[in-house]
């Protein structure tokens, strides 16, 4: 029987992909000036927060693979063009699903050593870091959801039980 935590992380990878799809479909209805508008948010704009999620995903996936990546700064705008960011998001979500399919009990029972963006060395349990990885995405999607309420475009429904349905979950 598959470990429940492994199954849970695989479900979160599926949710991540579908929630991002909904969020990007909604953000595509905004013009560039609305996506780039400075708002009272940590990463300043919808586009900035979408980029931050990408930065975070890449950092954590590299760490999970045993690699360190040089810091670009957590507020880096990797993709100023929304459509390029959207295409990259689709590919990154596929990469996250592949990672989730490969997670096993041994990986989750281990630790991951990494240097954070402020240069401090950490050694943390892998299961905690994978949980943080998915929570980080959800946290920042919530910020974008809030910023969307400040526009004329209604934010999408992102509740997990509304996004995921049994016919959309992993079959294996």
Image (cartoon, rainbow, N blue to C red):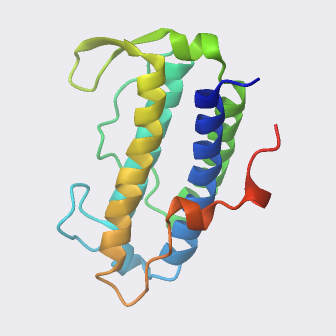
> From the viewer's perspective, is 70 left or right of 92?
left
Could you say where residue 140 lies in the image, as x and y percent from the top left?
Answer: 36, 54
Q: Residue 69: horizontal and vertical position, in percent?
A: 43, 23
For this orientation, the residue located farthest to the bottom is 152
Q: Give 148 or 35, whichever is nearer the viewer.
A: 148
Let me know if residue 66 appears in the view.
Answer: no
In the image as oriented, which residue stretches furthest toward the left?
Answer: 40
State the residue at coordinates (45%, 33%). 131
The location of residue 167, given as percent across then percent down, is 79, 59
Say left or right for 25 vs 95: left
Q: From what the image shows, is residue 168 above or below residue 28?
A: above
**In the image as oriented, which residue stretches furthest toward the front?**
1
Q: Where's the N terminus, which quadrant?
A: top right
- Residue depicted at x 29% and y 46%: 75
Number of numbered discs on residues: 0
Query: Relative to the observer, which residue lies in front, 160 or 120?
Result: 160
Residue 157 position, x and y percent, is 50, 73
Which residue shows up at 42% across the image and 52% down it? 138
Q: Is residue 109 left or right of residue 139?
A: right
**For the view shown, which residue lies furthest in the right direction?**
171
Snapshot quadrant of residue 144 = bottom left
In the displayed structure, would residue 78 be above or below residue 153? Answer: above
Picture residue at 29% right of the left edge, 37% below the top: 73
């Amino acid at each position: 029987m598959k470990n429940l935590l492994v199954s849970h992380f695989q479900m979160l990878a599926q949710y991540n992909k579908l929630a991002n799809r909904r969020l990007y479909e909604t953000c595509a209805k905004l013009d560039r000036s609305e996506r780039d508008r400075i708002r009272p948010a940590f990463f300043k704009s919808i586009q900035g927060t979408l980029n931050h999620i990408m930065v975070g995903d890449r950092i954590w996936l590299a760490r999970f693979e045993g690699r360190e990546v040089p810091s670009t700064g957590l507020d880096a705008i990797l993709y100023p063009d929304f459509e390029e960011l959207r295409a990259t998001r689709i590919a990154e979500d596929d990469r996250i699903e592949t990672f989730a399919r490969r997670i096993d009990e041994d990986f989750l029972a281990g630790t991951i050593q990494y240097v954070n963006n402020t240069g401090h060395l950490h050694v943390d349990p892998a299961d905690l870091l994978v949980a943080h990885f998915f929570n980080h995405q959800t946290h920042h999607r919530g910020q974008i959801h809030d910023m969307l309420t400040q526009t004329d475009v209604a934010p999408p429904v992102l509740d997990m039980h509304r996004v995921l349905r049994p016919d959309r979950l992993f079959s294996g």
